[in-house]
């Protein structure tokens, strides 16, 4: 995927390039949803069991906010979203902290 062709803020494009170059072994899919803020992106594991919503809006310079979304086991058969958007939330993470979280979420088992 051509990261520069995405309709995203430069802070998100820069982040995606850093992730690709910093940890090319991470296994995830980029969700290109036009309804997301231009300063946000969602990455989802290849098996779609966990997603990570990353944003730069409301964060300090070169800092990232993250929502970790996990399977919603309680509502699995109700027709609602399979991922619970209220998983865990972190703000003002450095790139190193963010990369550490992504490694846990997306590293091959």
Image (spheres, helix red, strand yellow):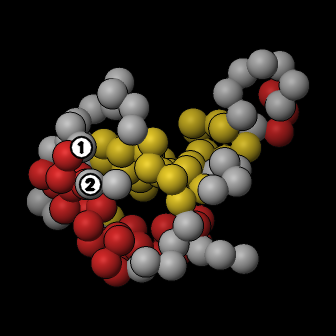
Foreground tag (1 vs 2) = 2
Q: Position of residue 10 (x, y in %)?
A: 12, 51
Disc 1 and disc 2: Cα gap in Å? 7 Å
Residue 48 visible in rendering: yes
Q: Is residue 66 above or below residue 71?
A: below
Q: Is residue 33 above or below residue 31?
A: above
Specify the quadrant that holds the C terminus.
Answer: bottom right
Q: Is residue 84 above or below residue 10?
A: above
> What residue would you read off at disc 1?
6
Label 1–label 2 contact, CB within 8 A = yes
Q: Is residue 49 above or below residue 24?
A: above
Report which quarter residue 72 is drawn in.
top right
Circle 2: element type: loop
Q: Position of residue 48 (x, y in %)?
A: 66, 48
- Residue located 39% across and 68% down the image: 98
Q: Position of residue 105 (x, y in %)?
A: 59, 65
Residue 64 visible in rendering: no
- Residue located 34% across and 70% down the image: 19
Q: Residue furthest top?
A: 79
> What residue would you read off at disc 2?
2
- Residue located 51% across and 53% down the image: 29
Q: Is residue 52 left or right of residue 104?
A: left
* Circle 1 Cα neighbour tier, 10 Å, few/some/many (<14 / 14–19 / ≥20): some
- Residue located 36% across and 45% down the image: 41
Q: Position of residue 58 (x, y in %)?
A: 21, 43
Circle 1: element type: loop
Instruction: Choose between 15 and 61: the one closer to the eye.
Output: 15
């Amino acid at each position: 995927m051509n990261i520069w062709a995405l309709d995203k803020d430069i802070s998100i494009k820069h982040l995606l390039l850093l992730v690709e170059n910093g940890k090319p072994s991470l296994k995830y899919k980029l969700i290109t949803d036009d309804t997301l803020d231009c300063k946000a992106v969602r990455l989802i594991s290849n098996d779609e069991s966990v997603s990570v919503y990353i944003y730069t809006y409301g964060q300090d310079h070169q800092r990232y906010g993250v929502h970790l979304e996990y399977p919603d086991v309680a509502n699995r058969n109700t027709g609602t979203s399979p991922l619970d958007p209220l998983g865990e939330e972190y703000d003002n993470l450095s790139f190193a902290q963010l990369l550490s979280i992504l490694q846990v979420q997306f590293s091959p088992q």
